[in-house]
Every structure is written in C-alpha cells, then in structure tokens.
Image (cartoon, rainbow, N blue to C red):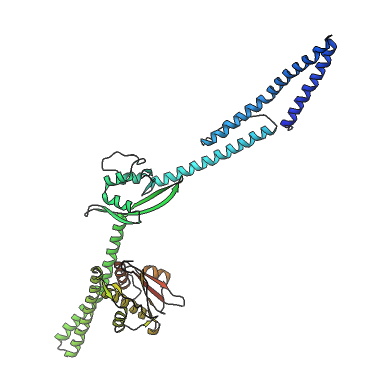
Amino acid sequence: MAKTSLQGRFIFLLSGILIACVGLTVFLTLKVPYWPLVVPLAVLIAFVAILIAVKLFFAPVTTTLQALRSGVASFKDHDYSVTIATSRDDELGELVGVYNELAGALRRERFGLFQRELLLDTVIQSSAVAVLIVNPGGAIVYSNQEAVKLFRDAGENVAVLEGESLEKICSRRSRLLADALAAGKDGLFSLGTEAEPEVFHLTCRRFTLNGSTHQLYLLKKLTREIARKEVETWKKLIRVITHEMNNSLAPITSLMLSAQKLTEMGADKEKLKEIYTSVGNRAGHLQSFIAEYARFARLPKPRVQTVQWQLLVEQIHRLVDFQLAEPLPEQTAEFDPVQIEQVLINLIKNAAESGSAASDIRLRVLQNSREILMAVEDRGSGMAPEQMELALLPFYSTKRSGTGLGLPLCREIVEAHGGSFNLFSRQGGGVAAVCKLPVAGA
C-alpha cells in the first residue's frame, strides 16, 4: 500500500471542499433569481460541509491518539500487554507500529527478567544459607525458607518473615543471635546449649534498594562442617602420634631385647652402656615430642608487660644467630615477652634450617602509634605456593623430624595478642615471616 501523509490527505480534503463550494455557488447563481441570497447561502453550506469533513477526517486520528495515550499510560503500571491495531499507512500508522514494537520488546524483556528472578528465588529458597534483607526501619522485606526455620520457635507455624521486626523475632529466638546481628560484623557465633552448640557464620552487607539503604544478612550453619573437620584433625593427630611413638618404641623394644641377650651372655658393660644410652635418647625424643604437643594444647593467655626492644633482642641473640635489618625502635612495647621471644626464636631457627646463611637471616622491627611489625627474613630454599598455604596448619611439616607445630604455635601466640601472622615469598629467594601486633590503646 502506497504511503500517504496526513498533510497530503488534509490538503486533498480542503481542495475538494473548495471545488465543491465554487461549483455550488455557480449552481445557485444560475438557479436562484435573487442573487444577493446566493453568497450567504453558499458560505453557510460550505461551513457546514467543512465541519462535517473535518470531523470525519479527525475522528480516526483522535481515536488512534487516545489508544496510544492509554497504551503509554499502561507502561507506568508495568503492563506491556496492550497493542494497537491499525490499517493506516501515514505517519500515525508508523507511530502505532513503533509503539507496538516497543511494547513487544518491553514485554519480552519483562518476561526474561521474571524468569531470571524466578530462577534466582528458587536457588535462594533452596539454599542452605539463611538469607534476610532488612529495610532501614528494621522490618524484614525478604527471607528464604532456611531463615524461617532458623528464626521460628519450635512448634510455631510460620510460613514467611516478611513484615516482621528483626529485633523482635531475634529476641524471641535468642539474645545471642540478636547481639550478633546488631553488631553487624562478619564472624562466627554459637547458639544452643554447651552440650549441643550450633555454630553459625554471619555475613553482613549494606546495599541500596529503591533509594534506601538495606541490610543483607547471610547465616550459614557450620556445626556439621566443624564437627567433620574436628574428627579429621583428631584422626590426623592420632596418626602422627602413633607414627612417632612407633618410631621410638620399636627401637626401644629391640634395644632392650638385645640388652637382655647380652646380659645373659655376660657381655661387657660398655656395650650395655651404649644400648642404655640409645634407649635414653629415644625415650627423651618421645618425651620432647609429647611435651611439644602439650605446650601447643595448653598455651596460656599472654601476660602483657612493658618491654624494651634492646633487652629482648640481646636475650634472643644469646640463643640464636641473626642480623638486625635496621635499628630497633626507641619506644617501649607492651606484650608477653616470654611468648614473643619464643615466636622469634622459632622463626629464626626455621630460617636457619631452611639452608640460609646466618648472615642472611635478618630481624626487622618497626613500631608506630598503631601497630608493631616484626619480620624474620631469610635467603633459604623458600617454599612452594602449595607449601605456603599448608605451612600454618597444625601437624603439617616439610621436615622429616618435624612435628608441624612450630609455625602454628607462632600464629597462635600472635593471634592471642590480637595480631596477625603471615608468610611471604621474598623476591630473589627465601621467606619472610611477618608478625603484626596492635599497640595498646590504639
């Protein structure tokens, strides 16, 4: 169908009316004998004809524009199902076509968003993590089934938490839970009784929704995972202790049998003395091994004292050999000198056992108003990335005679002081063991 414009149609209509009026005037002039009546009569007829023609012309235009107005208004209500049928081949018809294409695109996009939202909601509702979204007023605006299970009381028939006050349902469930959520910090907390504790990990995040800041809470129950890891740790501990005890008890048993035979044969005392010395050495090794485990398990709380760096480092220097990377801080520090001394001695011994020369083992101590940094640096054989990840785990050791408790003990002591302990590979080879302690009152 050939395209025609509204302007062309309107000009064609006015031209037809004008021609009709001229023809009507000529006709009336010929038929009406009294000509002064012809002009007013012709004008009246022409005016009526123009009104009728304009109304007939603009009626479908007005109807189409009203339909477009209603369709666009439906977009405000997120209703994209309205389409407009038309057979016009002018600009108005093109506008209707653009509207229908826009409505179709928005409808498809809306359907796609709905499908993704449905999928996301299905995943969240099926998740083992409790999810809560709370508005600025403290009311819950979203929760999943795991959250409903966590917050409802035993025997309570609650299907949703939306609209409930978070503070109210938390205080009803547990004061510990309310305190953990009110703190708004990531971390672990426990619920239940001492006999049957439930351990949870809490994640808190803030985000903006509809112009308002909302709070997102994720709570994951870790009781089973922790219990399983605890069993795995005990099994590994039993295997390590059994291995070490067999390594000591088997030679002791063999040596004692040999001593018994030599005694029966009347052997000289020197051979028996060598056997008894070997037995004593193996027993001493076993005793040292067990004492190391006991010390790790019974680490006392830090006894904080005022410490002068110069005196502490001189005392350590009498036991192990190392170099200072830079002058020591002049100000004093506050920590448990016995425990921190043990940490530095362990780290320096590890550096020496890594194959580093004593001249390349350096102790670096830095202190400002906020934190204390202690680093032991070496140029030994270094550690592979996978070893670096496992080095701080108890019972893991790359040494044949190692217990795997030296570095975990160092980390345990530093963290008991509120600090952090990490290992880093040095450029050019070697390892840097870095301890950070907070300054008291900072």
Residue 247 position, x and y percent, is: 26, 75
- Nearer to the camera, 423 or 19: 19
In the displayed structure, would residue 246 be above or below residue 62? below
Residue 287 position, x and y percent, is: 21, 76
- Residue at image position (43%, 50%) is 207
Quadrant of the rendering where the N terminus is positioned: top right
- Nearer to the camera, 356 or 377: 377
From the viewer's perspective, is 267 left or right of 241? left
Residue 260 position, x and y percent, is: 16, 82
Say whether residue 80 is visible: no
In the displayed structure, would residue 144 be above or below residue 415? above
From the viewer's perspective, is 215 left or right of 342? right
- Residue at image position (20%, 88%) is 271
- Residue at image position (73%, 32%) is 5
Residue 376 position, x and y percent, is: 37, 77
From the viewer's perspective, is 316 left or right of 20? left
Quadrant of the image occupied by residue 285: bottom left
Quadrant of the image occupied by residue 229: bottom left
Q: Residue furthest top?
A: 33
Say whether residue 324 is visible: yes
